[in-house]
Amino acid sequence: MIKMVRKVRHKVSFNINSMLGFQAKFIVFLTLSLFSFTSHSYNTTPLNTLSNVTKVLQDKRGFIWLSSQQGLTRVDGNNNITFSRSNQEWPLPFSWVHDIEVVDNKLLLATEMDGLWLFDTRNGEVEKIITDISEPSHYNATLFKNNYYSYAPNTNKFYRFNPSDNLSQIIHQNIAIKVLIHTPEQLYISNRDGLYQLQNDNLVQVINEPITALTALSNAVVAITANKIYRLGDDGSQSSIQHSQKLYGLTKAYDNDSFFTVSLKGKVSKYDGATLTPLPHYYGDSEPVRLKSAFHDASGVLWLISSHGIEQLNESYIKNHNLIFDIPINGNEIALFDNEIIIGSYGAGLQNFLQPVFNQESNAGFTRKGLKIVDLLEINNSLYIGCFDGLWRYDKGTNQVTKLDVVADKIILKLEQKDNLLYIATDGYGLYVYDLISEEIINHIDDSIGLQNPEVIDVLPLDNGKIWIAHNNNISIYQQNSHTVTTVNTPNRSKVISLVIAGNKIFASTLGDGILVFNQQGDLLAQLSTGHSFTEMLLVNDVIWASGKPGLYRISPTNYQVTMIENTQQYSFVSSMLVKNDILYAIHYSGVLALDLSEKKQFNPNVVISKTTISGKSYLLNKTIEIESGNDVITLDLASLDHRPGLHKKFQYRINNSDWQLMNNNQLTLTGLASGDYHIEIMATNSLGQWSDNKAYTEIHVAYPWYWTVELRILYVILISFIVLLASWLLFLRAKSIKRIHHLLKDDMRNYGRVMKTIQRNLQLTSTSLASNDLEQGKQLIENTISILKESIISQEPDNLAGKTLAIAIPFLAEYIHSKYEINLHVNLDDKVDSLTYELKADVYKVIFEAIMSATFKSEAENFSLTLKEVKQKLWLTVNSNNDSFNQLTSKVDFDLASYTIRQIINKNHASLNTFSNDDGSSQLVISFPLMTLN
């Protein structure tokens, strides 16, 4: 009996609090590291330098781990770290690792000379599993039902160790083991004699022929012999199928119970793990070599381990069809005719692609120049052919081509159909418009109407009647209504090859100046991939596909992202593309490339901080970082755990929800951080250039100086709160006093002020009447004054809306001031004003009342006109007076209670007030109330 009494740790824990620093600065300095990962070359181990790799697997975070003679290697797509005795940065007490297995966040290691260990993937610490097993060399190890099982090759003994009671047991005294695996319920070993299952501490042979490969599914194992593939279920079921290949590579699919086999010749096959039925897949052949191990990771990469090294096999959705004709230039065109793909060759006429459509007789009617086909277009079951000898048409029924007397022998560069019109682009003779019904030319667009270059390369007719025309190095827009041509101002000097409309924008591909983006008025919006050469463009499901020289590209019309399709960079594409059965066919100088466009689920890899370095000291992964000073330098090594080959991965970060910042590489260096807390988010793309939905996060806490400690900040808060409360209380008392004074003044003004001003005004008018011997008018004014004095005692002015609508209240106000003050108020109200909220209507009425009444008492105005309308999300109030009546409303020095009331309402509703004085003595008041929601 041996006890596990010690733990050997060879990596310091993640403790940053003990780091020394200086006083923090109150600035933030963020910079991307000037060093690429090659500056840490001692941590980077190329996979092709690893010798005798025995096994590969993937942990829960997505890192790939390899066991080899050189140690334990972690792969993240950017940096490879090998933990071994020879690596001082990441040391282990051993180097040669034979077997690895994932155990939660740890790896179970079987070593050559040091027994069994547990390696923590989070921090690089190792813990020796202490047993009484004398053999130091273990080739296989696994954890099954809380017991460790291992194989010691020097004595051919098979052991079990129980960590709960520290007891070990020999399961078999003399057996050679090649593979040791288990399902949740059963444990199996394989060797040259067959397959064995552990039953009641005994190994029972279940297959009695040599096993060449073995893997475990969720509830079964798959074993391969010389001519059969067996499936043994945990429920005791067994099935098999025949095979005729030498199979040494076998692995379970990452996300389901299917599995892959790899033959000695490199052929990859996929099978259903329940029925052993062959399944389709997109993997090509591997290197023809005998495999030692295989693994399928989360990103779909097949890792194949052999004595030749490591091979990564990726799914490919691209298939190339070699297609070369006996012509000087293999620059051909591709088209659909009768739902079959056909080829228009540049010198050999019409040719077949996948299915036979034409024969030798099909091209018999062509002239020598007619065999040079430039474009093809199927219209109404006929094939129209543009070539070096005008326009031709192929009839399937007669299997003959006929030349159409349309554009004579002119070279045709492009054919485009819209409705019943065929647009014929020529080399040097402009654009012809051919009516397919009347079979005659109905329009000719050339230099006679302003076309700068009669060489028309492409044409794009729009629904609004405009026709976009691509030339040698510019673009023209033809207006059908006016029969005029406008030349678009473009930045390119190279040929414009293709035009396409997407998202109400025009995209134009060029040979050397990238892709130009215009609005439909001809204004340049963007220039994409400057310096690249593109040929044809095709819109498929709101995505633009562009063929280039070289490469095939996918372009987003919304964010203008240009992405090259992997494995297409070796092809130089001619021009035309088409889609059939969700497959994009693009023709290039040596054949046709087929790309499967069927919707595929985007792979969102884990984005991780693979390594953290603080002032020269490195740690695996990342935790909350605490530093004493902003002088400390923090370097974060980032990884997007997509192991597929493809585009260079992009990274971006943001701090405390600020704007995203794009990085130049996979390292983020932070220094000069001010005291405080920082929340950092990191995004990355996968191998196809798509941003992953997963993000990496970290927290950084920079300590505060002594005068900004938590205790002192609490004291500061208490003092500031006391000061604020005291100031608030004093302001409240002052506001309360001012409010009381306002109420007194307002009541006094209402009770006495307006009455006295009315009497004063009437007396002035009476004096004027008496001076002009108008006794009757003077008498009437005196009686009116007496009446007003009586009414002021028993009546109340209509100074508020009082629950009524503006359509009722404002005309009533007009009648009121006319009957009381002999003032004329003309009203013009919009029908929409009463659909406003009552609060706003009440405020508007109050402004009208105070403005009219103030103008009545402060001027000799007799006529007012009022307009209230809603225009462009604003309510416009306009009051015109025949006298200078409103200047006092804008004065900040001399103002009355009416001015104060109006200003309060203006500020409350975020409105604007303006007054105007006219040369004839009249004046105007304009107030606009915004109706939209304001911040």
Image: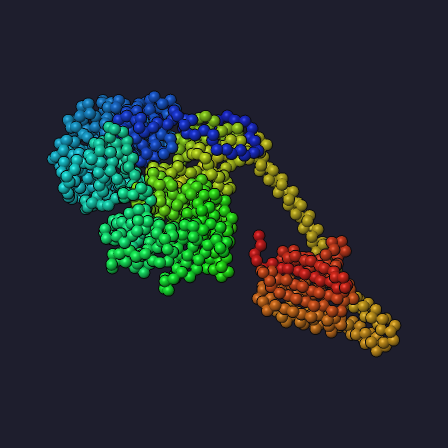
Instruction: Give above or below for 307 relative to 477.
Output: above
Residue 37: % across, % down: 41, 29
Horizontal placement of 132 versus 88: left or right? left
Residue 102: % across, % down: 29, 34
Residue 884 seen by the camera: no
Residue 860's image quarter? bottom right
Question: In this view of the protein, which residue sits in the foreground, 332 or 407?
Answer: 407
Q: Quadrant of the N terminus?
A: top left
Residue 807 seen by the camera: yes
The residue drawn where x is 56% and y is 31% is 25
Instruction: Give above or below for 334 relative to 181.
Output: below
Horizontal placement of 157 versus 893: left or right? left
The residue drawn where x is 34% and y is 35% is 63
Q: Which colour scheme is used?
A: rainbow
The residue drawn where x is 33% and y is 44% is 331
Residue 124: % across, % down: 36, 29
The residue drawn where x is 17% and y is 41% is 231
